Structure formats: structure tokens, C-alpha cells
Image (cartoon, rainbow, N blue to C red):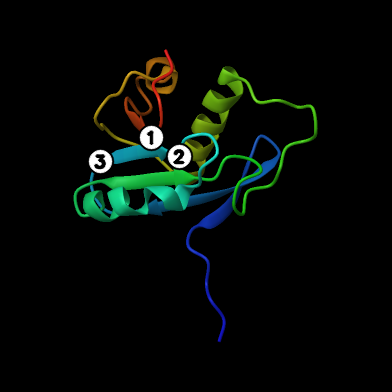
Amino acid sequence: MSHRRPGRLVDVDGITLHVLDEGDGPPLLMLAALGSNWFDLDPLTDRLRASWRIIRYGRPGYGLSEPIAPLNHPTLDGEVEWMRGVQDAVGPAGRSRSSRTRWPRSTPRRSPGAARNGPRVW
């Protein structure tokens, strides 16, 4: 018996990322904390997908996403670019709840909200 993996693989700035796009409603980008994976958000996603379009992805080197080159450490700007690339890959986004992250502030017309688990970073 073969198992089909959820989501799809997309190219974002030359790196293959595993992206999940599920549910109906306004889009909400959910980010797993460093050291965790998209599936760690399953319990929350299960509760929200009836009312929200939940977009999740594996950061480079996590799950099915391609690793980045050694010593090519991610930066905050790089994280924002991956979020933009994921948004471009899944298509247009409408309004969603806003959280205080750099991504919605840097792209207010494209998708003004994001959610993540883990400690706050300002």
C-alpha cells in the first residue's frame, strides 16, 4: 500500500519547500517554531480549517523540504522571502488576522496576517 504525502513541493528562491494549503476562508500562514515541523500544528489546523485557509510549510532542512547549504544560515529577511515565496506558490491571499510579525508588515497588501507557535520575536 502506498501512502500519499499531504501538500506539494514548490520552488522558492531555488530551494524546494514542502507546502500544505488546506481549508476554506481567509488565508492564515502558520509557521512552526524553530526545531519543529508543520505537522506539529495539526491539532490547531484541525480546529481552524473549517473557517480558515491554512497555509503551512516546512522550513529548509525540515521534513520534506530541501536543506540549505552548510554555513548558509537563514536570516530574518530570508525567512520573510520564504514566506513571500510560499504565498506566491499557493496563489492570492485575502485578509486574515494580523499578528505582530515582520512578514505582514512588509507585505500589507498581499497578506496582512501570519501565526506562529513558539516564543515571540520582535
**Residue 9 image label:** none
Label 1 crowd (10 A; few <14 / some 14-19 / many >=20)? few
> Do tag 1 and tag 2 residues touch (Cβ < 8 Å)?
yes
Q: Position of residue 98 (x, y in %)?
A: 27, 24
- Determine which of the numbered discs, if any, sits on residue 26 in the image: 3
Instruction: Name the amino acid, label 3.
Output: Pro
Element type where label 3 sits in the image: loop
Q: Residue at x 50, y 32 (%)?
A: 83
Question: Given this view, does label 1 or label 3 mark the residue nearer the observer?
Answer: 1
Amino acid marked by disc 1:
Asn
**Residue furthest right as drawn:** 70
Q: Quadrant of residue 14?
A: top right
Q: Quadrant of residue 74?
A: top right
User: Which residue position is annotated with label 1?
Assistant: 117
Q: Which residue is mark 2?
A: 32
Which type of secondary structure does the marked residue at label 1 adopt?
A: loop
What x and y, as percent, mark residue 67?
71, 43
Of 67 and 118, the residue lying toward us: 118
Which of the image's four quarters has the C terminus?
top left
Which of pointers 1 and 3 lies earlier in the amino acid sequence?
3
Where 73 sits versus 60, above or below? above
Q: Residue 22 in the image: x percent, y percent? A: 35, 54
Element type at mark 2: loop
**Left or right of 57: which side holds 50?**
left
* Residue type marked 2: Ala
Query: Image height check: is 112 above or below 59?
Result: above
Q: Is residue 31 left or right of residue 98?
A: right
Percent position of residue 40, x then y: 42, 49
Pick the front one: 112 or 122: 122
